[in-house]
């Protein structure tokens, strides 16, 4: 137990050094505000403390997620739910990698940042709610909560997402529970994890992802949704291919005889 604790502390120290020193300037430059650097690094370290399996992922993938989170301006956490870091086993590489998973709140935040969205919301419809959708030359949606509203998730019949434009007008997307379950069935983790423990947030995220491609100037939100889809399908995110360029500072001669940070061991 003592040896395991010592190894975890050592890996945490290596991760801290990589975040704050080796790749610190690159992460700081990627953040919307450099003043958030210390708080951002602490958020990354807290995620690893809450889920030590993240320390088994390659250091390169953790840093790539950090840079991507910084670029998107999403702080990973397990409380607010803007973004999450999860281990993903890459069979081709035979190594565990870190994946960035945006939460539905994070996707909505990214959509609002475009400056063209004044309001974006996602809600669930429960049995006995009054829910009406009209499509045509003047699409509109009405939802009047009933006695079961905001209650047992098993009573949810639909989910929907609405975005109002700053210039006027709006866009919405709806999904039946059956349609959500079809998406869940395609997920590599449809029978475990959040789809089991937090069905509603996952359903809301699913309908938001269907709405986002129709929103103007929502490039960041679309990219984040694509990363989520890749994880759902069990596809390595390969953040290098998505514009995340890690400056190979780790290959520079280490200071004071210290070894350069090495990739974490696989599971």
Image (cartoon, grey):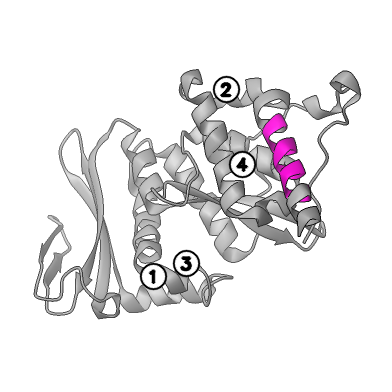
Residue that badge 1 annotates: 199
Q: Which callout, 3 or 4, points at the residue further toward the start of the chain?
A: 4
Give the SS element for disc 3: helix
Label of residue 229 in the image:
none
- Classed neighbour count for the residue bearing mark 3: other residues with Cα under 10 Å, few (<14), some (14–19), many (≥20): few
Name the residue tied to disc 3: 194
- Judging by the rendered image, the residue that carries numbered circle 4 is 65
Q: Residue 29 sits in which quadrant?
A: top right
Q: Position of residue 8 (x, y in %)?
A: 73, 49
Instruction: Check if mark 4's residue and mark 2's residue have beta carbons within 8 Å.
Output: no
Front in this rendered view, residue 133 or 152 = 152
Residue 126: quarter of image: bottom left
Q: Classify mark 2: helix, strand or loop.
A: helix
Residue annotated with mark 2: 28
Q: Nearer the viewer, residue 108 or 170?
A: 108
Crowd band around label 4 with a 10 angstrom C-alpha radius: few (<14), some (14–19), many (20+): many
- What separation in Å lies between label 1 and label 2 (alpha carbons)? 35 Å
């Amino acid at each position: 137990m003592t040896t395991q604790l010592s190894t975890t502390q050592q890996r945490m120290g290596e991760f801290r050094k990589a975040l704050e020193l080796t790749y610190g300037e690159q992460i700081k430059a990627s953040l919307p505000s450099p003043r958030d650097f210390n708080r951002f690094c602490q958020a990354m370290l807290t995620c690893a403390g809450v889920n030590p399996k993240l320390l088994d992922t390659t250091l390169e993938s953790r840093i790539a997620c950090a840079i991507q989170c910084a670029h998107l301006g999403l702080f990973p956490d397990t409380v607010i739910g803007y973004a999450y870091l999860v281990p993903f086993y890459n069979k081709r590489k035979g190594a565990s990698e870190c994946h960035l998973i945006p939460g539905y709140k994070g996707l909505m935040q990214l959509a609002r940042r475009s400056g063209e969205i004044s309001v974006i919301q996602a809600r669930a419809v429960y049995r006995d709610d009054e829910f009406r959708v009209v499509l045509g030359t003047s699409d509109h949606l009405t939802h009047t909560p009933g006695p079961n509203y905001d209650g047992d998730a098993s009573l949810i019949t639909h989910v929907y997402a609405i975005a109002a434009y700053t210039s006027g007008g709006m866009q919405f997307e709806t999904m039946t529970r059956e349609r959500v379950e079809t998406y869940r069935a395609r997920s590599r983790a449809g029978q475990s994890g959040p789809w089991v423990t937090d069905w509603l947030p996952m359903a809301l995220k699913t309908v938001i992802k269907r709405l986002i491609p129709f929103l103007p100037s929502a490039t960041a939100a679309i990219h984040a949704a694509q990363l989520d889809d890749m994880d759902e399908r069990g596809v390595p995110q390969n953040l290098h291919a998505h514009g995340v360029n890690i400056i190979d500072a780790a290959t520079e001669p280490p200071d004071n005889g210290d070894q350069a940070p090495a990739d974490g061991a696989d599971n």
